[in-house]
Amino acid sequence: MAEIRVNWHRRHKEGLSTGDKAADALRNGMGSWPFVGLFLGFMGLWALVNSIVLATNAWDPYPYILLNLFLSMLAGLQGAILLIAAKRQDAIASAMAQHDYETDVRAAAQIEMLMNINAEQLKLLQELRDMRDRP
């Protein structure tokens, strides 16, 4: 039966809190072209409805103070979400650097062992040559 290997990426993802997962999902959503398109469409629709369609009974007439309030709240929320996501990215980069360091240390130990084996083989080969060359 084949052994299923779980790398540290999967272990890291499984250890995320609900808040971390939500921050990643929101960051990925807000940093996409569909979000930008929908957001621009929403703002255009808001302006259209409040300026033309409901010109006399608009709930947020020009200069759209309520829309400005929503945009300010969204900007504050996005800043916090981006900081949370950046903090997580720093943690991931740190874990990757630690993993690379541990791999390098193991590789250096294995190379040292192989160099010792190679030196021993060269020593044995030289002894065999010396034995062969003796009269």
Image (cartoon, helix red, strand yellow):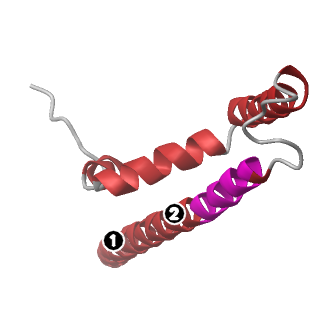
Q: Secondary structure at mark 1?
A: helix
Q: Nearer the viewer, residue 89 or 68?
A: 68
Give above or below for 101 relative to 36: below
Residue 65, how many percent across, how many down? 78, 53
**What's the residue at 33%, 69% (across, down)?**
110
Q: Quadrant of the C terminus?
A: bottom left
Asked whether residue 65 appears in the rendered view, the answer is yes
Q: Secondary structure at mark 2?
A: helix
- Asked if disc 2 and disc 1 are in contact, CB closer than 8 Å, the reply is no
In this view, the residue farthest toward the left is 1
Per the rendered image, the range of residues in magenta is: 66-79
Q: Amino acid at mark 1?
A: Arg
Residue 38, how many percent across, how many down? 72, 29
Residue 59, how many percent across, how many down? 72, 37
Give above or below for 52 relative to 91: above
Residue 47, how many percent across, how many down? 85, 34
**What's the residue at 25%, 55% (across, down)?**
15
Q: From the viewer's perspective, tell me whether residue 130 is left or right of residue 56.
A: left
**What's the residue at 78%, 30% (across, down)?**
57
Give how far apart the Cα atoms at labels 2 and 1 are. 26 Å
Find disc 2 in the rendering and name its residue: 89
Disc marking residue 39: none
Q: Quadrant of the N terminus?
A: top left
Disc marking residue 106: 1
Q: Nearer the viewer, residue 25 or 98?
A: 25
Q: Which label's residue is closer to the chain start, 2 or 1?
A: 2
